[in-house]
Every structure is written in C-alpha cells, then in structure tokens.
Amino acid sequence: MATVDNGRPLPLWYTLPEGFRPVDLSADPEERMEANYIALAELCPDAATGQLVASALAFEAALGRLVEDGMVHFSSFVLRTDDDLLLTGICQISVTDRPAGDPHLYPHSALRAHPDQPDTHKAVVELPPGLAAVVVADQAVTVPGTLFGVEGESTSAVRTATFHLAFPRIPQAVVVSLSTEVFEAQEEFLELATLMAAGISFTAPTPDPVPKSAPVAASPFG
C-alpha cells in the first residue's frame, strides 16, 4: 500500500496482515462519520442516538488531530490466537521529521528520547527495511467519556509496541505503533507488531512478472 501525506506521495509502502481493517483517511469526513455512526449503531443497539452521534464526532475530531500530527495510516485489528484468545487493538503509522545525517544513527537517538520507566523495554533491532528502535511499554490511558457519548472519563491499561525507522534518503522517520488491552496474548501481540514493522518498505514493490505463454506446438495434421 502506497502512502500519501497531505497529498504528497511518500517513498513508503507497507502490507497489512490479515485481520486489519484500515480507516480511509482520504475519505470525506462526513461520509466517514456516517459510516462510523452506522457501525456503532450495529455494535451498540441499545445506545441512545445522542451517544452514537457524540462518539462519531469525537472519533473524527481525534482522527483529524492525529493526521495533522503526521499520521498516514490508522486501522483496527482482530485476530484469534492459537489459544483461542481474541487479540484486538489499533495500529498507527506516522511520519515525523528527524535530524539530518546518517539514518543508521537515528534508532539510537530515538531510544534516548524515550525515558527509562518501569514496564518499558527498549532495543535496536534489524528488520528488512533497516535498523529500528523498538519500545514496548505498558501505560494507563485516560479515555474521555465523549468518545462514548457520556460524561466523565475512564482509565484503561494498554500495552504498546512502537518501532522507529529512518527514511534512507530524506530527513524523516516512520513510526509504527500497535496498541492492545489484551495482555494475555503478549507473545502473539509482539509477533504481530514485528510483522507489521517488518513489512515497511522505502522502495516501490516490483510488479509480478507476466507469465510467458507456452509456445504452440505445430499440429502433426497440418
């Protein structure tokens, strides 16, 4: 999948694993809100109309802020593990500026920018697109009640795996982040996050060659 940032093509391609449902960031916001409203109504048939409208509006507003901050992809994912657990979460891909210079040095500077905290693990790993800084962290996330059309707010425990990779020829970096509340599927979640980051490419995919037709044998009957 090719990437566009504010209408500008980027040298960034990626492949979504099975079970991912992307949000079309190029779609008309009103049409996207209406589709989100319909999906919420099917998911929560007992919710009041006002709650559904408020939730759709809040999601669209949050999405707009993320796009302004450089997000180029947003998707949800649902997969069933071998242990019959339902692994759910969200995936974001963002593009950010990085210091000019050797792209191989960027992962180390990205790690230094993340403070050392409990329940945080950091490393530099080798992936097909290049060196990547990876940060796995557990944190409490405050969820505004407006997302659900209610007052107040709630707190959720979330595990996030974030990969930072430098574009090889421009002073920018791509950040791939997956989050989940399903802590029981830690191994499968980390494998999925690594698979997603490993699928990043900074060169356009080569089209599959067109198979050549087999030569037609001459008929022995003329």
Image (cartoon, grey):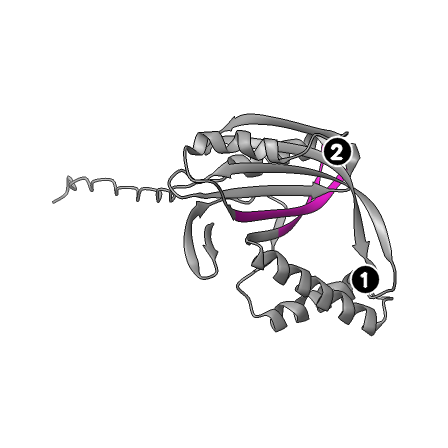
Q: Nearer the viewer, mark 1 or mark 2?
A: 1
**Relative to 135, does residue 170 appear above or below in the rendering?**
below
Magenta residue check for 78: yes
Q: What residue sits right under mark 2 in the picture?
A: 185
Bin the neighbour count of mark 2 within 10 Å (Cα to Cα): few under 14, some 14-19, many 20 and up.
some
Q: Identity of the amino acid at label 2?
A: Ala
Which residue shows up at 58% across the image and 36% down it?
163
Image location (x, y in percent) of residue 116: 70, 30
Segment colored magenta: 75-95
Bin the neighbour count of mark 1 within 10 Å (Cα to Cα): few under 14, some 14-19, many 20 and up.
many
Q: Name the chief secondary structure element in magenta.
A: strand
Question: Which SS class for mark 1?
Answer: helix
Q: Is residue 158 visible?
A: yes
Magenta residue check for 56: no
Dot label at residue 148:
1
Mark 1 and mark 2: span between their CA atoms?
26 Å
Q: Nearer the viewer, residue 185 or 63?
A: 63
Mark 1 vs 2, N-terminal side = 1
Q: Residue furthest left?
A: 222
Which residue shows up at 76% across the image and 65% down it?
55
**Relative to 125, does residue 155 appear above or below in the rendering?**
below
In the rendered view of the protein, which quadrant contains the C terminus? Answer: top left
Dot label at residue 179:
none
Image location (x, y in percent) of residue 204: 38, 44
